[in-house]
Image (spheres, grey):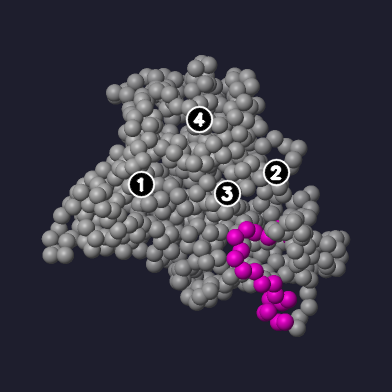
Amino acid sequence: MLDRQPRRLQVSLAFDPGNRSHTTLRLPGGWAALDELTSAAGDASATGPRARPVPGAPTLRSVDHAPGARVQLHWRLTLDAATGLGGSAQAGAGWFAFSGQGVLAMPDELDQRSAPSACVQLDGLGAGSRWASSHGSGEGSTALLRVAPGAAPLAERVQQALYAGGALQAHTLSANGSTLTAVMPADAGWRFEVAALAQASAEALATQRRFWAEREPAPPWLVLMLPGPAAPAGLDSAGGTAWLQALALQAPTDLPLPGAAFDALIRQALARAWLADRFGPLAHAGRGDEAMRAWFSEGWADFLAHRSLLREGRWTPDDYATALNRKLMAYLIAPERALPQAQWLAAATTQPALAALPVARGEWLALQWHQALSRAGQPGLEALMRRLLVPPALARREGPISAPLATHRLVAALRAVLDDRPLRDIHRHIEQGEVFAFGPGSLGPCFIGQTARVPSWRLGFEPASLLSRVVAGVQPGGPAEAAGLRDGMRLLGHSLVPGEPTQPVWLQVQAEDGSRQEIRYLPGGDPVHELPRYQPVPQAMEQSACLGWLGLGPQAGAVAAGARSAGKGKAQGARKTGAKKASTRSTGKASGKAGSKAGGRSSGKAGVKGVAPLRRR
């Protein structure tokens, strides 16, 4: 039941093994408690195959069974206690959502030559429930979703999908032959309507497709908005992940829409979606080595999203400089900044804070290569990437060991211009962890940098006060106290930029005598660091060099011509626009308890980022 603790799901798997008498199952990650049942009803007297652990492989199970006989396995899954903090499954009192990667087991030995399909059945909720997924939608107490054959392996199409059910409200928007459905819990308390979410998401998706010069009709897309974790508002409590034709966004319920925070949130998620699907596999099938390329899948997502926000006019040059200065500071003062990749991979599972390291390295590497291409007379990194786009029908996230990965294809294309530099840079900065150096022009011709003494960011009071709305833990002698903040004051409103000591904190408070006042201060303190700081050049967006750096102005023609000659169609800089609405549909539904089954044959300020919903392994 979703309204009981602990929340549980029952998961059943059924498949036809063909002539095999042994099958290896790949279990999803993030299962806090997994109890195998001998029957769907949990009858202890029933008999059936048992999934046995595989030594040295915690995500695998071994199953012996009779050849030719349908295999059925059942588990009771207790949702992770941390699901609300970005786990692979999340649940509220009347809804639940999960990634297939986080909940659904799949056989490893599927015969891909027979183009297998699968069905995912979701049931156990009330009659008024609504279901949404990467593979379709439904209404009522049960939904049966068919996973059709495709270029990617069946297990990938099941486990890379997004699923949700319960008391959900939805809005479907159709425009230019494409369909996008926005879904969010009905009782989350958002300040915007689901129709506004659909419209803003459709505009962002249309801009993304125009930028990559997409010509084929877009497949149906799902955008799932979930409440943010229990963290102080504005303190890195938003994030987004990309799944099969779906985005899972997570943000505080006071997120303004439209607004700069949402713009950054969805553009980062869309960049992740394109990098995950459209440039080649990110991992070797069965090896689970996707994290080795997080510098590309996550770091380049930031590079692309940040430039998109500036190019579209949703960020000003000052916004871009603020975001990059904040990221630079976090990178350069981090004790782990020089950690080699092998050590990072070993420590990342137990130290979530390390996740930011490859993201930063990836963006710095992209900036350097973009600059190197420009100096070599090339239109830049994004123009080169357009030539590497894989048709949507051939997109897959994992590939055989014999096939080139997305990063292999990228390096091969770069070497045609930059010789062996890309290989050397990856070895030095990604594998060995050598710290990047930053000069006055490292962010490109739109910005100029110089070394400055920068204090550490210190909020000056307990961050939990932003949730409790009562000020506590004011640091004696700190800037907050000097500005007049005192313990016990009621916090009525606030505005701040986490991690940026040069941006003022603004607080509206009420003292014990009932008087109200506004408090403003710079959240800086010891230690002070010598760091590069960047600011826009005068009239940056009117300078031809800056416009060319962003793929705008006269240089954009060279980008488009290069894309056309490569047979990729006209490439054009994205501009802020709205999708032309053809038809819409909105619904809201209620729910009850939840269960799931999977069966198949042989088968605040711009730049929010932090907890990723429905996290990837």
Q: What residue is disc 2 on? A: 284
Q: Which residue is mark 3?
A: 348
Chain-order first, disc 1 or disc 4: 4
The answer to which image quadrant residue 408 occupies is top right
Q: Quadrant of residue 184?
A: bottom left
Name the residue tied to disc 4: 436
Q: Nearer the viewer, mark 2 or mark 1?
A: 1
Please name which of the two marks, 4 or 2, marks the residue nearer to the observer.
Answer: 4
Question: Within 10 Å of the Cα at label 1, are there few (<14), some (14-19), or many (20+) other Cα atoms?
Answer: some
Check if residue 227 falls in the magenta segment. Answer: no
Which residue corresponds to the image point at 54% horizontal and 54% vertical from the top-left? 615
Residue range corresponding to the magenta coloring: 25-44
Which type of secondary structure does the marked residue at label 2 adopt? strand
Mark 1: amino acid: Pro
Mark 1 or mark 4, which is nearer to you?
Answer: 4
What is the CA distance from the residue labelled 1 to the residue labelled 4? 23 Å
Mark 2, Cα crowd under 10 Å, few <14 / some 14-19 / many 20+, is some
Q: Earlier in the sequence, mark 3 or mark 4?
A: 3
Helix, strand or loop status at disc 4: loop
Q: Cα distance, mark 3 to mark 2?
A: 20 Å
Q: Secondary structure at mark 1?
A: loop
Which of the two labelled residues, at mark 3 and mark 1, occupies the earlier sequence position?
3
Along the polypeptide, which appears first: circle 3 or circle 2? 2
How many other residues sit within 10 Å of disc 4, few (<14), some (14-19) or many (≥20)?
some
